[in-house]
Amino acid sequence: MTVWAPGPALVVYHAGVTVICELASQFTDEAAWGAATPCPEWRAGDLAAHLRCVADDYHEYLDEAPVSRLARLLGSSAGPESLSRKLARQNAAELAALADGTGPEHIAAFVASARAYAQRVAPIWELPHHRYRDAMVTVGGMVGAACAEWHLHAWDLARSLGKDYRPADPEILVAGWQAGAPHLPLDVPLAVATCGPRPAGGAWGVATGGSRASRPWAGGGWGTLLRASGRLP
C-alpha cells in the first residue's frame, strides 16, 4: 500500500501544478480557451477560473480549520452524492462571482495560490483539518484531496486539447484521495462530477468513449479515480 507522506506527496502535488501549466500553454489564443471540457457547462477558460477559485478555497479552509465552511458541510454527514451536488453549486457560484479574466491570467493566479498553499502545509501536516463521520482528515490529508484535484483537472484540460493524460504514479494519488476525501469512497462511482450532474446517458461535451486500449487513462488506479470523481461512468 502506498503511504501518503509529506515528501512524496508534495512532489506529486507540485507535479500536478506543473502539468496544468504545461497544458495551459497549449491553448494558443483566447479562442482556444473556448474549447469544450468533460463538463458540459464549462469551457477551458471556465476550468482555468475554477482552478483559481479552488486554490483560494484551500487557503480559506486552512485558515479556518477545523471550523471552516467545508468542515461544517462535511460535518453534516450527508452522503457522497448530496455533498458533491452542494460543492458543485458552491463551485458554480464562486465562478459566477469571479472577476473577468483570461485563461492565462486565471492559470497564473492558480499557480501562485497553489504553490503558496504547499509552502504552508508541511509544518502542520498532522493537525486536524475537518471531520467526516468517524474519519478525521488532517491538513496532510487535505493536501491529498488537492493533489488529486490538480491531476484530475489536468486530465480535463488534456481532453479539451484532444489529448490523453495519465499521471506518472496514480497509486500515490489514490492514497491522497483516500486520506483527504473519505466522503467519496473509491468503490462508488459518482453521478456528479466537479461541475455538476453527468448528463443523461453518461456523455460529456468531450468524447471519453472507445475501448480501454484506446483510453490509457481508463484502467488501474487512475481509472478508479476518474470513475470515483464522476468523470467516467
Image: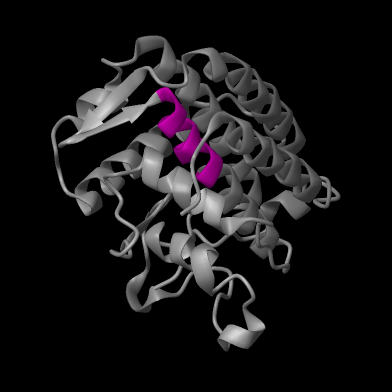
Residue plotted at (46% across, 28% down): 140
Q: Residue at x 30, y 47 (%)?
A: 84
Residue 42 showing in the rendered view: no
Read off the magenta span: 139-148
**Going by the picture, which residue comes out furthest to the front?**
1
27 drawn magenta: no
Q: Does residue 143 show up magenta in the picture?
A: yes
State the colouring used for the structure image: one colour
In the picture provided, is 196 more to the left or to the right than 8? left
Identity of the residue drawn at 45% across and 70% down? 232
Q: Foreground residue, 85 or 79?
A: 79
Tally of numbered discs: 0
Left or right of 37 on screen, residue 74:
left
Q: Main secondary structure of the magenta part?
A: helix
Image coords of residue 17 (percent x, y): 68, 38
User: Where does residue 114 sit, x and y in percent of width and height?
Assistant: 62, 27
Q: Identify which residue, 116 or 101, lies in the foreground.
A: 116
The answer to which image quadrant residue 164 occupies is bottom right
Residue 175, percent from left and from top: 46, 48
**Residue drawn where x is 42% and y is 66% of the image:** 227
Up/down of 217 relative to 157, above or below = below
Q: Is residue 76 above or below residue 85?
A: above
Q: Seen in the image, is 79 located left or right of residue 5?
A: left
Percent coordinates x, y for residue 230 in the rendering? 39, 61
For residue 62, above or below residue 211: above
Image quadrant for the C terminus? bottom left
Query: Is 37 or 12 nearer to us in this picture?
Result: 12
